[in-house]
Amino acid sequence: MSISAEGSARARIVTALLRDGNRILLCHRSPRRRWYPDVWDMPGGHVERGELPRAALVRELREELGIDIAAPSGPPLREVRGETFDMQIWLIEAWTGSPVNVAPDEHDAIAWFTQDALGELSLAHDSYLAMFSRVLAE
């Protein structure tokens, strides 16, 4: 676990950029959430003590979307560092099951978006739109 400049533990976060052809799946964070309320974000969550990030991603996608993935074998697509967190983002293009909102206390909606709809969304991080656009253009 990393320590921030203030001496508090930095949160270790893992997220998945789920792509199905020309669309990506995003989750709308509940307006009642303490961190990043009322924005669209990728599914994922905190890495627990003693847990590997790849295993955490598998667990989080099962808990939030009810899908199963193979643990990613390669490096993350992207890493984002904030003042209080370190986040790893993996591109996931294969899973078993159909994504549903299994965690309505965390997300009040999930939805698939194509490139032309992304610019209208309030996203959790400023860098997301460029990353989503690059992935969808590939």
Image (cartoon, grey):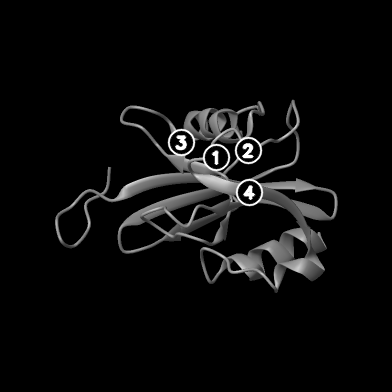
Q: Is residue 14 above or below residue 6?
A: above
For the residues labelled 4 and 2, say whether their Cβ atoms are less than 8 Å apart.
Answer: yes
Q: Residue at x 55, y 49 (%)?
A: 89
> Disc count in the image?
4
Compute the Cα span from label 1 to label 4: 8 Å
First in sequence, mark 1 or 3: give its number: 3
Q: Earlier in the sequence, mark 4 or mark 3?
A: 3
Which comes before the other along the chain, label 4 or label 2?
2
Tag 1 residue: 104
Amino acid type assigned to the residue bearing label 1 in the image? Pro
- In screen coordinates, is 119 left or right of 78? right
Q: Using the image as rendered, state which of residue 56 and residue 72 is in the foreground.
A: 56
Q: CA distance from mark 2 to mark 1?
A: 6 Å
- Front of the two marks 1 and 3: 1
Q: Residue at x 51, y 61 (%)?
A: 38
Determine the image quadrant of residue 5. bottom left
User: Residue lying farthest left?
Assistant: 7
Residue 64 image position (x, y, % from top left): 56, 35
Distance (Cα) linking label 4 and label 3:
25 Å
Q: Residues within 10 Å of mark 4 (few under 14, many from 20)?
A: some
Spatial CA span between label 2 and label 3: 22 Å
